Amino acid sequence: ARSDIDHFSYQDTKYECQRRTPLNHHNKKFTEAFEILEKHASYIDREHGESRALAFRKASCALKSYPREITRIDEISKITHVGEHSLRVITDILENGYSEEVQDIISCEMFHVIELFTGIYGCGPSTAHKWYSLGHRTTQDIKDNAEILNLNVQQKYGVEFYDDLNAPVDMPDALRIQRLVVEQLDLIQPSCSAEIVGGFGRGKQCGHDIDILISHPEEDKVEGLLVKLVNRLTTLGCMLHTALSVGKNVVRKETFVKTKATQTRSTMDNLDRCFAIMKVEKSATDNDSCNSWIARRVDLIITPSSQYAFSLLGWIGSKQFNRSLRLYAWKEMKIHLNSHGMWDHKLTPPKRILATDEEEIFKALHLDFVERKDRNC
Ligand code: CTP
Ligand code: MN
Ligand code: MN
Ligand code: MN
């Protein structure tokens, strides 16, 4: 298909990691429709939802990479990942200005309730469905029925701080939290680095949380660091809720055995991490309420220097970019890639490939380097 699409300078690739996907692109009216279809597929269609959602996401990613606004359907009819269903949606929008299928979803109550419930920290689509089927419609319903619904800790905080946690985080907020973390790290272990990763690392101006990747030039200096940091932040009264995961870093113990390398879609890693809800000072512009602070979701991740490049690549994201990168690495290169490192499985036993920065990882994978701002798929 690639040769048919040359004059638009669009790279029709099998994997998203082989092309650039900027944040600001030319086809928002289509990709916004696809995002709704994707959500709807994963929320409502329990049986084929995942694969349908993925198909819409891949179509959406293709349009995000497309270097200009699509005005005619034949422009894109041959693009990989824009399938029959997606073409129909694009055709509708081109012809009528909207997609009836999308309109139907938007006017469906269930969709909005599932959307509302999955916006609660700790609540995924299946829990949301359960609550919906029990007749609940608002976050107040969930709050009122916390006992009967047997809410877990995350969900309790999710409901309690629903408004705060659903108010977008902006860059000044992110910088304020980074500053706080750096100050505390300096007191515990000088010379640590604390980089803002996630969406902000890809150039987004706002996000749903703040992701901070922490490391130290000396390999062993991160040992035990997370607990000390979280304890300090707790003592300072900055932590409303913390969920720690410590000491499962299998690579550090040098007993890493790859088991299911084909299951590269999992984004979970074994780095020391803390998923927290933090109390953050309000910025000067937020003078609309009497509270002087706001609750924010913060992810703190610790990585030893030998794994830094891999953790950075993994935590910059986007999720879909990583998925495609890991799938590409395995399918095309027989390399197992995750946030800890990469292993060449063309050799027996598999050989670890080291890298000190992101560029080296792309090089080892025989890929053109994709800048962070172009990983917004
Ligand atoms: N990630 C991960 N392991 C997790 C959670 C997240 O590797 N257990 C990665 C994701 O793949 C993603 C990045 O960390 O690339 C940030 O995740 P997240 O905060 O969920 O998404 P963002 O891209 O930052 O989007 P947002 O602005 O909405 O926070
Ligand atoms: Mn959720
Ligand atoms: Mn994030
Ligand atoms: Mn996060």
Image (tube, rainbow, N blue to C red):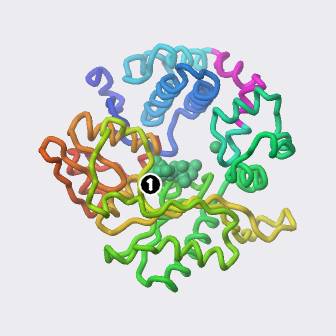
Quarter holding residue 114: top right
Q: Does the residue labelled 1 lie within 8 Å of ligand 1?
A: yes
The residue depicted at 62 percent of the width and 52 percent of the height is: 208
How many residues crowd around disc 1 within 10 Å: few (fewer than 14), some, or many (20 or more)? many
Q: Which of the image's four quarters has the N terminus? A: top left
Specify the segment rendered in magenta. Answer: 96-115
Q: Nearer the viewer, residue 272 or 79?
A: 272
Q: Nearer the viewer, residue 309 or 374?
A: 309
Q: Position of residue 223 (x, y in %)?
A: 40, 73
| Drawn side of residue 159 relative to residue 290, left or right | left
The residue depicted at 43 percent of the width and 15 percent of the height is: 74
Residue 108 vertical placement versus 359 (above, below): above
Whether residue 29 is visible to the viewer of this picture, yes or no, is no
Q: What element carries label 1?
A: helix
Q: Where is residue 187 in the image (x, y as percent from the top left)?
A: 52, 86
Residue denoted by label 1: 316
Membership of 97 in magenta stretch: yes
Which quadrant of the render holds ligand 2? top right
